[in-house]
Amino acid sequence: MTTQSPVHIITDSSCDLSDDAVAELGITIVPLEIRFGTETFVDRVELSTADFWERCRSDPELPSTAAPAPGAFAQAYQRAVDAGAPEVVVITLSGDLSATIEAAQQAAGAHAELPCHVVDSRSVSAGLGLIVIAAAELAANGSSGTEIVDFVQSVAPRVRIHAALDTLENLRKGGRIGAAQSLLGSVLSIKPLITVTDGRVEPAGKQRTRTRALAHLVDLVSTERANIERLAVMHADCADVDDFVARVAPLTDAEPEVMMIGPVVGAHTGAGTIGVVFIEREPASVSPE
């Protein structure tokens, strides 16, 4: 008896999943492009996360990003066909932050051989990563493409991303946050806080020191501890991440995934960023009396 291949999960390189996680779960990553001045690199192919952060430390140019071309998704779809996948689910970073989803949709419309479900995660970085992990687990357990899409759409509003930045200059230059907000980080070593709300980056206050900013993040996890289903810590090559994880990990039963922020997100958040990401538990349904 022949066992049908599971639904194949495709995402983009803003997910910040490790190579080991990608290989273990059989996920395909479609890379975005990273630019330093006139030089362009294919994320995770021509530029590793370690190389990106090393370059950021020495290059006066702030990096920028570009969405993949539809052809990059078309190639990923063809590989899924060749591997015998019955259908694919493509989960992209928020459409409010990138045109990546448009490229995925355009390629899907031109690929009649394979049912392609394209869904907006309304998230990014470890938020997208946690959604993709859960989707890949569903696929491995035999869920259909429609069932996985329904799951992604139901879980997206329950993903919470909170981060402390060392600077807002990258976000300001990249146009992902209002220019006036760049003033938050310009005096007294103030550390800006951001959140991702319905797929958009929003300011979420400020703390005067990094110590206070990280304590604020720990308090957020502590406050929501009973409501957390999955948890991740994301960081931009931060030396203090192990200490931070040690503070967060005991607060919930959800063992935290630790994800290094890669070039796509790091180009906009800058070095020193650290954050917590969690998926809230689904509200219990109320039985009619």
Image (cartoon, grey):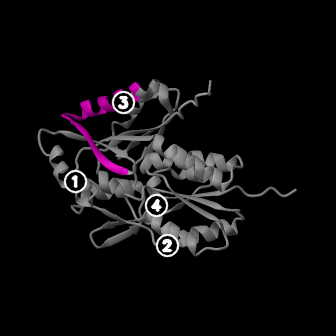
Residue appearing at x 62%, y 27% in the figure: 287
Residue 178 numbered mark, or none? 1
Q: Which residue is mark 2?
A: 70
Precedes in sequence: disc 1 or disc 2: 2
Q: Of circles 2 and 4, which is in front?
A: 2
Query: Does 202 lie within the magenta span?
Result: yes
Q: What amino acid type should be assigned to the residue bearing mark 1? A: Gly
Q: Nearer the viewer, residue 37 or 120?
A: 120
Residue appearing at x 21%, y 61% in the figure: 60
- Side of 6 relative to 202 (left or right): right
On the image, the x and y values in percent for residue 233 come to 42, 39
Q: Of circles 3 and 1, which is in front?
A: 1
| Crowd tier of the residue under label 3, counting other residues whose Cα lies within 10 Å: few below 14, some 14–19, many 20 or above | some
For the residues labelled 4 and 1, the Cα–Cα distance comes to 29 Å
Precedes in sequence: disc 4 or disc 1: 4
Precedes in sequence: disc 3 or disc 1: 1
Q: What amino acid type should be assigned to the residue bearing mark 2? A: Pro
Q: What amino acid type should be assigned to the residue bearing mark 4? A: Arg
Q: Nearer the viewer, residue 192 or 111?
A: 111
